[in-house]
Image (spheres, grey):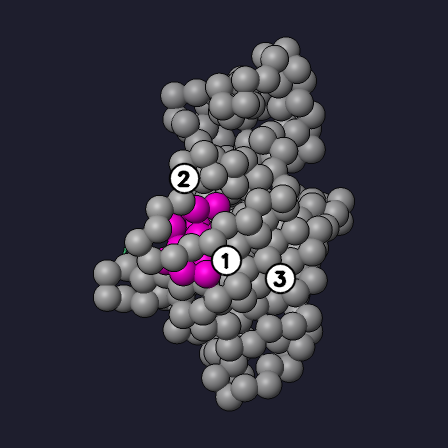
Amino acid sequence: MLEIRNLHKAFGSLEVLKGIDVNLEKGKVLAIIGPSGSGKTTLLRCINLLEMPDQGTMKLSDRELNFQPGRKIASREVTELRKRTGMVFQSYNLFPHKNVMDNIMEGPVVVQKKDKAQAFKTAQGLLEKVGLGDRGHYYPHQLSGGQQQRVGIARAMAMEPDVLLFDEPTSALDPELVGEVLRVIKQLALEGRTMVIVTHEMKFAADVADHVILMDGGHIIEQGPPDQVINHPQSARAQQFMNRIS
Ligand code: ADP
């Protein structure tokens, strides 16, 4: 589903990704963990081209892109690749002046030109899936952070992406609201959605991920099944990180 080879990204002279390789099969969940500033969010944003990689190749479903310094990717290619991803942001990023239903329908109706009645039906189904079937007419400010993030997840799914991308989906939430969001994500994992999740929630990563990548300083320093990477890391650097956060 997703194949990344030798991905590089710099911001000016700051090299943030220094040759990243990722393989993710359809229906699997990849968790990306690591210290702050290690490049996790940048990698996630490169997958849907919110950040443009400098070098490397990326294959997502049926699209393949080859990045080279000085070579611009055609905007049609960017659009095609983005269509295959759905992003859930740390800070929800809902439109504040639109109600929940319109937030979810915006992409399908405005971008994908879907029939409004059909988009409404799909959105209602998604709201029920995230436990907010009776909140369609609410505005974001009338909802808790956990509820807003569940709307964010429904909105990402409304575009029927091949892969869902989560950027620290619970880190802006009060601790008591984290569980309700993680439960929704876990349910999606059980349904076989392909997902990439940047998270600080180690227990959650261990619970839902099929594969974990531990990043440090722009490199993948360890990867494998969650139990191996989280509970039995091999390298000294990985052990140090795990000890510090546990
Ligand atoms: P993480 O998600 O692991 O905390 P990030 O990918 O957010 O790490 O950031 C990695 C490094 O890249 C940090 O040093 C950060 O300051 C820098 N960085 C991220 N985005 C930008 C940007 N748009 N411009 C300049 N520097 C950036």
Which mark is nearer the camera, 3 or 2?
2
| Whether residue 30 is situated above or below residue 163 in the rendered picture | below
Residue at the (60%, 81%) spot, across then down? 233
57 vs 40, nearest the viewer: 57
Residue behind mark 1: 57
Which residue is under mark 3? 23
Residue 156: image location, x then y, percent: 55, 36
Gap in angstroms between the C-alphas marked 3 and 2:
24 Å
Residue marked by disc 2: 74
Q: Is residue 84 left or right of residue 16?
A: right
Q: Which residues are magenta?
A: 41-57
- Sequence-wise, which precedes: disc 2 or disc 1? 1
**Residue 35 in the image, given as x and y percentages of width and height:** 43, 70
- Crowding near the residue tagged with mark 1, few <14, some 14–19, many ≥20 C-alpha atoms within 10 Å: some
Q: Position of residue 29 (x, y in %)?
A: 66, 56
Q: Using the numbered discs, state the Cα–Cα distance from disc 3 to disc 1 in whole angstroms.
A: 12 Å
Query: How many neighbours does mark 2 have within 10 angstroms: few (below 14), some (14-19), or many (20 or more)?
Result: few
Q: Secondary structure at mark 3?
A: strand
Looking at the image, is 93 positioned above or below residue 71? above
- Disc 3 residue lies near ligand 1 with CB under 8 A: no
- Residue 119 is situated, as x and y percent measured from the top left of the image, at 62, 18
Compute the Cα span from label 2 to label 1: 15 Å
Residue 51 highlighted magenta (yes or no): yes
Assign a secondary structure to mark 1: strand
Choose top left, top right, bottom left or bottom right for residue 134: top right
